[in-house]
Image: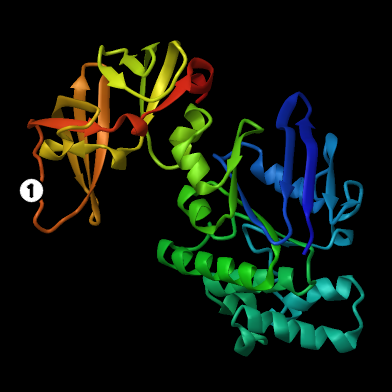
Amino acid sequence: MARLQIEGLSKHFGPTVAVRDVSLDVRDGEFVVLLGPSGCGKTTTLRMIAGFVAPTSGRVRLGGQDVTALAPWKRNAGMVFQSYALFPHLTVAQNVAFGLEVRKVPKAEIGPRTAEALRLVRLGGLSERLPRQLSGGQQQRVALARALVIRPDVLLLDEPLSNLDAKLRETVRVEIRELQHELGLTTVMVTHDQEEALIMADRLVVMSEGSVRQVGTQRDLYERPADRFVAGFVGRSNLLRGTVIGSGRFQTGGGIAIACLDGSPGPGVIALRPERLVLGPASAGLDNRMSGTVELVSYLGSSIDVYVRLSPADRVVVSQPNRADGVLPREGDRIDVGWPAGAAVVLTEQQGGAQ
């Protein structure tokens, strides 16, 4: 275990800025996820931490030591690549032992440490198989064992579940989180999958266009997003443009007046989470209540999404649990929609303008 500190990290590829002044402090044993869309700089940041990409500026410290100029194999960082990067001609045991051999660990130690790493990922009986004889989930575990066998100070995961099918992803992400917790490993993972990030992380780092937009817990980012990008990327939000017209009052571009709890006068955006809105009689007595027309009903199994047009310029989606005794609204129905003032997060024009 070790504390990881990133200080003003930037990377330029010619005139293109891939990463811009990223700073982050990852505590001993903490699981931090870099979350963002493709091309946002998260993988480049991870590769700079690992030593595979040299930063244009900034420092990387691991356990208090400046490792910015050190080669990857001198950083004691375990890396799991998106493609697993297993050697096809080597057995499972040989793949796992490779990092120990590169580090010139005494041969007497290599066997026991390899066996222990395979035991941790529940592959002890497959040590003599070749990668092509394994399933995708098993290959992913081999890659994880290879990263763990060196007893890393930090574990780095680059989209480790992206090659697995949806059902297997659910299982493996829980296994990785439990193993990380059991070993107390300082871990940084990259993903564009928000559900994966919300389940696995202690803290999230949301990135866009090479910069950090917000750092915080799942609750921080979900309930108090820093800007429109975070509000739209972490979970789902109804984003309504308009103007804060006074203390606790917002008016959308479509002319709808909304009661809220904060916001400075001027242009802005209201962010409303779909599950905070309610339909029909249940909306009675709420701070905001208005009538709209149902445009679409989407049946999702455990929940139902109802798209309601409130004005020519304003539409919201309302997410409701699917109850056996529930009556589904139909397209074209007029229906009331309501929500408490505290459900409306007001973002300023500067916060709201970023996509």
Residue drawn at the location 80% of the way across and 39% of the way down: 7
Whole-percent x, y for residue 67 in the image: 89, 51
Whole-percent x, y for residue 233 in the image: 47, 38
Which of the pair 208/272 is nearer the observer?
272
Residue 35 sits above or below residue 266 on the image: below
Q: Which residue is mark 1?
A: 327
Residue drawn at the location 89% of the way across and 54% of the way down: 71
Tell me, yes or no, if residue 206 can be seen here: no
Q: Amino acid at mark 1?
A: Val
Residue drawn at the location 15% of the way across and 26% of the way down: 292
Which of the pair 50/276 is nearer the observer?
276
Looking at the image, residue 300 sits to the left or right of residue 42; the answer is left
Task: Please identify the quarter of the rendering in which residue 341 is found.
Answer: top left
Task: Please identify the quarter of the rendering in which residue 87 is found.
Answer: bottom right
Q: Secondary structure at mark 1?
A: loop
Give the number of marks. 1
Residue 353 sits above or below residue 160 on the image: above
